[in-house]
Amino acid sequence: MDKRSLTFLKALVACPSPSGFEQDGQRLMARYLREAGVESAFDVHGNLHAVLNEGAPVKVMLEAHCDEIGFLVSHIDDWGRVWLIPNGGVTVPTVAAERVVIQGRKGPVNGVFGVRPPHLMSSSDREKVAPKDLAEAPVDIGARSKEEAEELVALGAPAVVDAGWVQLAGSRVACRGFDNRIGAFIITEVMRRLAEEPLAPLNVALHLVGSVQEELGLVGAQTAVQLVKPDIGICLDVGFATDMHPQDCRKMGDVRLGGGPIIGTGPLYNPKLRQMLLDTAKLEEIGCQYQVRARASGNNAYSMRLNGGATAVALVGIPLRYMHSPVETLDLEDVEKIIRLLHAFLGALPENPDLAPEV
């Protein structure tokens, strides 16, 4: 990955984007696209939308959700402690002794999920350090009173765990919020490369959608697909890597960091579109991995198929360890492989692909 792309990725994941508060990160995406000559705009729901080759008869919606899991301020008590509720699927025990950053009235407000010293705990207390519910985990922002805390933060303010980019061995990286800013990065990078480095003139209208509030029930994509009305929908989202906990292979398949893109497999996904992606991967000498679903699963390919009318959908996943934790981990080589795959696939997509079953 070149320096320009990596700088953009680091800036994107550093920007807090909890569900319902995605716009700061999306504005970074918009600026990056504008540098490539591609304009974008928000719809009324907050989805970011850009298009290349508008007017072509076949529309492709390249989608990734921009939100991450986080918290909302729900209560401030008389001692100035701040209490939070989950905003998305938070794994509550992971917050013990973590830092948190709250969107304050005048800027970011830092806090900590404090824990009692072991010296003051009984043996049974030590077994309860990791809270089961956020109602057991107040945040200390340093305020001395309720009034002082209320001057800093408001009820309903969003917050995220303050866990940034950590370079691991080789091309592996850990960071909060890769689910799913890494998908948002990929669709933006693919659009930029198609604008600046086209392999051939596009035959289709390519609609980028950076959607909102996926973590709250696939919300943004359901509204965006009704506006775009795509013929083809390609969802970019993280997928479960099972290489650190091999017992999960029995449920999720054998998926490894560095093994390449995950191609969604099952009745939800259009078999011809899926095969076209696999054929492109073979031409590009990119290995693929597979995760099988018999029923609809929690990604926006489901939203696009059910709400888009006659939309053929595919899912391309990014292998990710430790999903919904402050230390989500991926391999940047997988990210680059997926960008190359989509760049080649979209650049060669015919003007009117036949994706219906044969009679």
Image: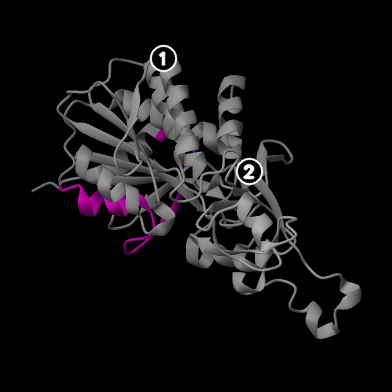
What is the quadrant of residue 280 in the picture? top left
User: Residue 66: percent from the left, percent from the top?
Assistant: 45, 43
Q: Which residue is mark 2?
A: 108
293 in the magenta segment:
yes
The N terminus, quarter of image:
top right
Residue range in magenta is: 281-309
143 to the left or right of 161: right
Task: Name the kind of residue labelled 1 in the image.
Answer: Glu
User: How many numbered markers are drawn?
Assistant: 2
Residue 38 seen from this side = yes
Residue 270 seen from this side = no
54 in the magenta segment:
no
Q: Which residue is mark 1?
A: 196
- Residue at image position (56%, 57%) is 324
Give the camera-side residue of 357 and 239.
Answer: 239
Question: Which of pointers 1 and 2 indicates the residue nearer the eye?
Answer: 2
306 to the left or right of 215: left
First in sequence, mark 1 or 2: give its number: 2
